[in-house]
Image: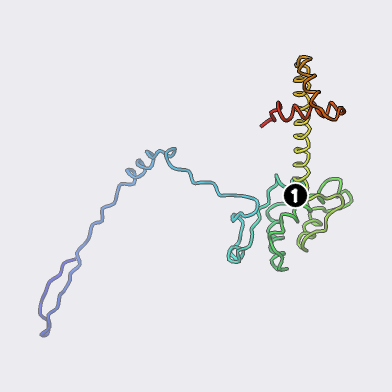
Amino acid sequence: MLGQKKVLRGRKVVSFSVVPVDYVCASADDVVAKIKRIKWDSLEVFPKIDRSFNKNLSICDESEEAAGGACEEFDPSLYPDLARIGFGPTQMRQIRQAWQKLGLALDGLPEALDRANWMARPENCVEIKNPLGYITMALKNGMPSPPPGYKSRQELVAEAMREKAEKIRQLQHQYFEDAFTVWWHELDESERRRIDAENRTRAMYDVHRREFFKRHVFKPLT
C-alpha cells in the first residue's frame, strides 16, 4: 500500500493506492518434517487428575461446581457388589441430582453407597427381581436405612484395628514371657537365691521374679 500527499479542493489529503501483495508461507512438507523430528518422549507428561473418592471433578456438572458441592465418582473397587449388579457412573449422576433436588448434603453419599453395597450382596437380594432398579430408587430417595447386619466402613476399620492391636499385645506378652524364661534358666543358682531373697512377702515368687526382670533386665521391642 502506497501513500501520496496532495491538495484537493483546498484541503490537504493523502491518497492511497493498493498494489498486489505476495504472502510467503512455510512449506507444508517442511512443517511436517519438523513435527516428525519432535521427540515425544522428552515432553513432560501432564500430572494425573486426583481421582480421590471424596472430590473428583471429572463428572461434575457446572451447577455442582458453582454450588461448591462434593462430586463423587463411582469407584467399582470400593463397591464391588454394586458394580456386580450394573451400578455405575450413570446411576451415580442420577442419585446425585436427586439428592440436590431434595436438599440433601452430598457428603453423605459415601455412607449411602456403603449401605447400598451391603444391600447388593448376592445373599441380600435373592428375592429382588431388579436389584439395580430397586437399589438405585432407594438411593434417590435419600439415605437408606442400615440393612440387617450392616457394619459401616468406620466400624470395619475400627474392628480391623482392634484385632491388629490385640495381636500386637499377644505378641508383646509372649515375647516378654519367652525372654523371662530364657533369662531365668540361664542364671546360676546363687543369683536366683539372691533375687528371691529380695521378695519381702515370701510369697508369689513368680510375680516377684517377673517384676525384677521387667525393672532391671527386660528391653521391650521397639
Residue lying at 73% horizontally and 48% vertically, measured from the top left: 79
Q: How is the image coloured?
A: rainbow
As rendered, which of 45 and 152 lies closer to the eye?
152
Vertical placement of residue 7 versus 56, above or below: below
Q: Is residue 107 left or right of residue 8?
A: right
Residue lying at 77% horizontally and 57% vertically, measured from the top left: 136
Q: How many marks?
A: 1
Q: Tell me residue 130's x, y (percent).
A: 83, 53
As rendered, which of 185 and 193 lies closer to the eye?
193
Q: Residue furthest bottom?
A: 10
Quadrant position of the N terminus in the picture: bottom left
Question: Mark 1 belongs to which amino acid?
Answer: Gln
Q: Tell me residue 48's x, y (percent).
A: 54, 46
State the residue position of label 1. Answer: 154
As rendered, which of 144 and 220 lies closer to the eye?
220
Neighbor class of circle 1 (other Cα within 10 Å; few <14, some 14-19, many 20+) is few
Vertical placement of residue 147 versus 166, above or below: below
Q: Tell me residue 29's x, y (percent).
A: 34, 43
Q: Tell me residue 46's x, y (percent).
A: 49, 46
Vertical placement of residue 45 versus 172, above or below: below
SS at mark 1?
A: helix
Quadrant position of the C terminus in the picture: top right
Question: Residue 100: which quarter of the image?
Answer: bottom right
As rendered, which of 15 and 180 lies closer to the eye?
180
Residue lying at 68% horizontally and 48% vertically, measured from the top left: 75
Residue lying at 34% horizontally and 46% vertically, measured from the top left: 28
